[in-house]
Image (cartoon, rainbow, N blue to C red):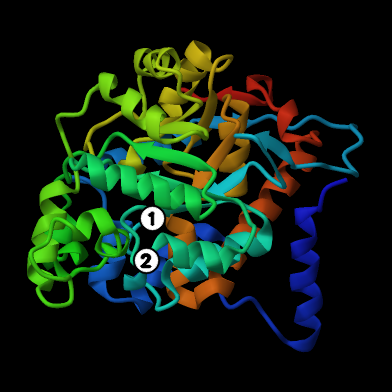
Amino acid sequence: MAEEWAAFQYEIYLNGMTGAVPRLPTDLTRLEEVAEARLGPGPVGYVAGSAGSGRTARANRDALDRWQIVPRMLRDVQHRDLSVELLGARLPAPLALAPVGVLSILHPDAESGAARAAAAQGVPFTLSSASSTPMEQVAEAMGEAQRWFQLYWPKDREVTESLLARAKAAGYTALIVTLDTWLLAWRPRDLDQAYLPFLHGVGTANYFTDPAFQAGLAKPVHEDPNAAVLHFVNMFADPTKTWDDLDFLREHWDGPIVLKGILHPDDARRAADAGMDGIVVSNHGGRQVNGAIGAADALPGVVQAVGDRLTVLFDSGIRTGDDIFKALALGARAVLLGRPYAYGLGLDGQPGVEHVIRSVLAEFDLTLALSGHTSPTQLTTDALTRTNA
C-alpha cells in the first residue's frame, strides 16, 4: 500500500493540540488572494496574469467546473494506492510540478527550493529552461529524485544541443517541449507594470551558463550583461518551427519526449505519428491565447484520438484535489500543477511548496475514497456527470 496522503489532515489536527495552525491556507484556491496581499505587484502579476482579458484562464476553471463527481457508496476504500507508472518511472501519485520560469522573483530559494520540496514528497519537478537557477544546481538540490526538463526551443541549434546534453548529464529523464509560446502573448498585468524579468537577466541562468550561448558573445556575460540579454532575446523563441523539426529533438534526446500545449485531436495524432512519447493538454494556463478553448474541454477529444498511443498529461486550471480527480476521469494519466506551488514558494519557500503538494494530494486521496475508488487507474468518465451550465 502506498502512502495515504489523506493522513496530512490528521497531522494538522494533531498539531492543533499545541495551538499550531497551518501557515498557509489549506483551501489552495485562496493562495492567489494571499499572494496578492503579501507579494509585490510585478511578481504576483507575472504568475497570476493571463493573456488579454483573462477569458481563457476563466474558461479553464469553467471547463473543470462543468463536470461533477458522482460518488458511489458501500465500496471498500480503506486502503488506497495513488501510485502510477509514468514515462518509465513509478510515481507515488499522478502529479508533477509544472515548469514555471523565473521563480527567483517570488523567493530567494527559487527553483532549488521548489525542487527540494518536490523531491521530499516524491513528485517530479519540471525545470523551466527559463529558470533563474542553472539546471545543474537544481539537479544537485534534488539528489536522485525524479526531474524533467522543459524546453523553450531556441533558434540556435548549437545552444539547443548544448541545453539538451546538459539536461541529460544532470539526470533529467524526460523532455517537455512547450509548443505554444513561440511569441509572448499580450499580457496586460505585465504590460501595465512594464515588467519583464528577462530584460534584467532574470530567468536566463541556463543560457548565461551555457558554453554554446557564451560562444556567441563578444564579451563574457558579466562584462556586458546587456549584450547577453539581447543575445538571449534574439534566440529565445522561434516561430518558424514546424512538425518536421521534431526529428532534430529525437536525434539529440534519447529519453521520453512530451509535447506541451496540445489542444486539437489532429495535433495529438501528429505528435503520435512523429514518434513522441506523450503530450500535455494545455493552453499555458490561459497565458497565451485569449479566447481559447478551456483545457478540460479539449481533453476528452484528445484522449479519444491518441490515449492508446501516447501518455496524455494535463494542466491549466488545476487548483484542488477534485480537479485532479476530474482530469484523470477524463482520461489524463497525471496532471501538472503550476500556479498554486508558485504561490506557496513565494509565501513560505520550500515548506510552502510542500504544503501545496501535500494539501492537493490529501484532498485528492479523500475525494477518491469518498467517491468510492481506491486507485487513479479506476477513474473513467462513469465517475462524472456533465452539467449544461
Q: What kind of element bears circle 1?
A: loop
Q: Residue at x 77, y 35 (%)?
A: 375
Quarter of the image with the C terminus is top left
**Residue where numbered disc 2 is placed:** 103
Q: Decide which of 364, 386 is in the foreground and name it.
A: 364
| Residue at (46, 32) in percent of width and height | 257
Q: Is residue 57 visible?
A: no
In the rendering, at what x and y percent does residue 294 appear?
37, 32
Residue 354 location, quadrant:
bottom right
Q: Which mark is residue 11?
A: none
Quadrant into which the N terminus falls? top right
Q: Amino acid at mark 2?
A: Leu
Q: Secondary structure at mark 2?
A: helix
| Circle 1 crowding by C-alpha within 10 Å: few under 14, some 14–19, many from 20 | many
Badge 2: residue crowd in 10 Å (few <14, some 14–19, many ≥20): many
Gap between marks 1 and 2 measured at Cα: 7 Å
User: Would you say residue 243 is visible in this rendering?
Assistant: yes
- Residue 130 falls in which quadrant of the image? bottom left
Residue behind mark 1: 100
Q: Is residue 48 above or below residue 39?
A: above
Residue 25, percent from left and from top: 56, 69
Q: Residue at x 34, y 41 (%)?
A: 284
- Residue 147 is situated, as x and y percent measured from the top left of the image, at 55, 51
Say which of 159 and 68 sits in front: 159
Image spot of residue 98 (x, y percent): 46, 49
Task: Give the image quarter of residue 248.
Answer: top left
Query: In the rendered structure, which amino acid carries the disc numbered 1?
Result: Val
Please tell me whether residue 95 is drawn above or below residue 250 in the rendered image.
below
Q: Are marks 1 and 2 in contact (CB under 8 Å)?
A: yes
Q: Residue furthest bottom?
A: 18
What residue is at 76 percent from the left and 80 percent from the top?
A: 16
In the rendered image, the vertical position of residue 67 relative to residue 268, given as above or below: below
